[in-house]
Image: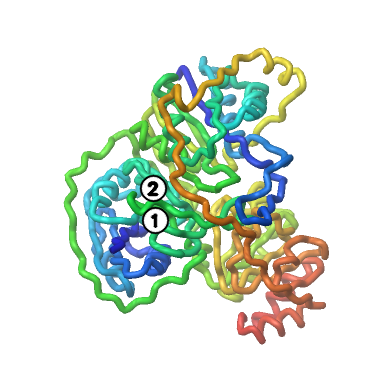
Amino acid sequence: MKKIMVCIKRVVDYNVRVRVKPDNSGVMLDGVKMSVNPFDEIALEEALRIKERGANVEIVAVSIGVADTQQQLRTALAMGADRAILVQTDAAVEPLTAAQTFLALAQKENPDLILLGKQAIDDDANQTGQMLAALWDRPQATYASKLAIADGKATVTREVDAGLETIEVDLPAVVTVDLRLNEPRYVKLPDIMKAKKKPLDVTSLESLGVSAPVWLKAVRTEPPAQRQKGIMVKDVEELVDVLKKKGLI
Amino acid sequence: MSKVLILGEHDGKTLNPATHKCVTCAKGIAGAEITVVLLGADTAMVAAQAAAIQGVNKVLRVDRPENAHALAATFAPQIAALAADFTHVFGPSTSYGKDLTPRVAALLGVPQVSDLMAVEGAYRFRRPIYAGNAIVTVEADPARKLVATVRVASFEAAAAGGAAAIESKTLGVALPAHTRYIESRSGSTDRPDLQTAARVVSGGRALGSAENFKLLFDLADKIGAAVGASRAAVDAGYARNEMQVGQTGKIISPEMYIAIGISGAIQHLTGIKDARTIVAINKDGEAPIFEVADVGLIGDLFQIVPELSRLVGT
């Protein structure tokens, strides 16, 4: 294996509680802390571990987004990626467009493996990896909680509703990662300094021959319905009484 | 007229209730003609079950040995070939549907709407984003095929009483050999399935160990409940991964959800907000779980849960 491409999305930080704009036109993003999508961080960590186990492999971190997405790619470089590519655009990039863009990059870079998170925590779409694999006409292994590479094949244990499923795919392949694949490392200060010298290329959708249409129009954004305020009970007996009255036990 | 193709989920013997919920979602499109497709090695049993769902007009069977295991790379080109006759393709937002449906959409060159929670028109839907912190209404282009996954927790299962025609299809679709099924492992139990159970008992990090989860299993067995867990409990190794409830685990809608020692992170709450009644037991009265609970009890779970097991058993 020579090259791993890791797709990274810039998203609102995991700890931020987003709020809907009063005019229902979207969510408030001004001044909100942005981070690497946590699942993509796990994907990158896995690539780094493959490299650290002795594979002579180049790790390329790629992203699509506004100019400031360079911050997240610098984080990826600080974690240990060798170089980065930003496809810079101010357009809202939907999963199908993201998949088309990553396909264009894959056709240039010819990676043996593409790793990315199973979903981004902003739109929760859970589509990009599967769409990319389809467009690339290559295997997909989604929701990976264990990944072993040998002899041009990847053996992937997947987290599925019924438990765990193991499949084997020929490389090149797309693997989307789940929470328990690994625990990403913390970035140390010297690594951040070193990352500043690593190459970060900026390109555009146009130069990759991809357009970013509005596939799906967001008409209105609302806060979720609130649940009615509940009651507090003082002990187990009262709890059992209440549940019996509600016909629940 | 809308013609909806639903990707039926099954294990060869039983049709997953997620399929019935997709049917209810599709019925929300006025005048929709609903077809359920089943891929498998032998789908005779599950086809009969699908044909009996009220509102289903037709059941398609695609039986071939390569379909013995639900591999997205194998299924997707077959679904894409079938999709020519339909305006909509719906899969369930289960691990099966979430894996397969986007691959179908990409083969068709169309976008996907994930996690439909409400139907406002044939091309207008509501779906959650940001772990359910916002609900967005999206409109798709009627000129294109509409591919979507259905957030099954948002819909009741369609009732029995249908008698749809069953048709076997032979598709001349070449299948890739690059993806191979190896094995499945599940922590199979006699308890109800977490995703469809009417009652769920769920534990968090406060349980402190895998052994202590036995307290929850005892209670669950008394009331016929499934057992779930928070991400924290799963990450700590107290519970198996398939027990995780929340944004990145299972989204469930039981009649009663008993959250024990779960603080109630937003990512967890998004998985349970469709529960009819939420009961919270936690020693921290400030825990966010109490903001969504219908019934709350502050106290030590190690005293409360055994007592609760004793009292509900009488």
Label 2 residue SS: helix
Q: Nearer the viewer, residue B83 or B1?
A: B1
The residue carrying mark 2 is B100
Cα–Cα gap, marks 2 and 1: 8 Å
Label 1 residue SS: strand
Q: Residue A56, relative to residue B29: is it above or below?
A: above
Residue A86 x/y as whole percent = 56, 25
Amino acid type of disc 1?
Answer: Gly
Which image quarter is the N terminus of chain A in? top left
Q: Residue B53, relative to residue B151: is it above or below?
A: below
Residue B86 x/y as whole percent = 27, 56
Labelled disc at residue B91: 1
Q: Earlier in the sequence, mark 2 or mark 1?
A: 1
Tell me which residue sits at (32%, 45%) in the image: B76
Q: Residue B155, relative to residue B185: is it above or below?
A: below
Residue A18 x/y as whole percent = 68, 50
Q: Nearer the viewer, residue A72 or A149?
A: A72
Tell me which residue sits at (62%, 56%) in the image: A24
Tell me which residue sits at (67%, 18%) in the image: A195
Amino acid type of disc 2?
Answer: Leu
- Is the C-beta separation of discs 2 and 1 under 8 Å? yes
B218 to the left or right of B103: right
B288 to the left or right of A179: right
Residue B18 x/y as whole percent = 42, 63
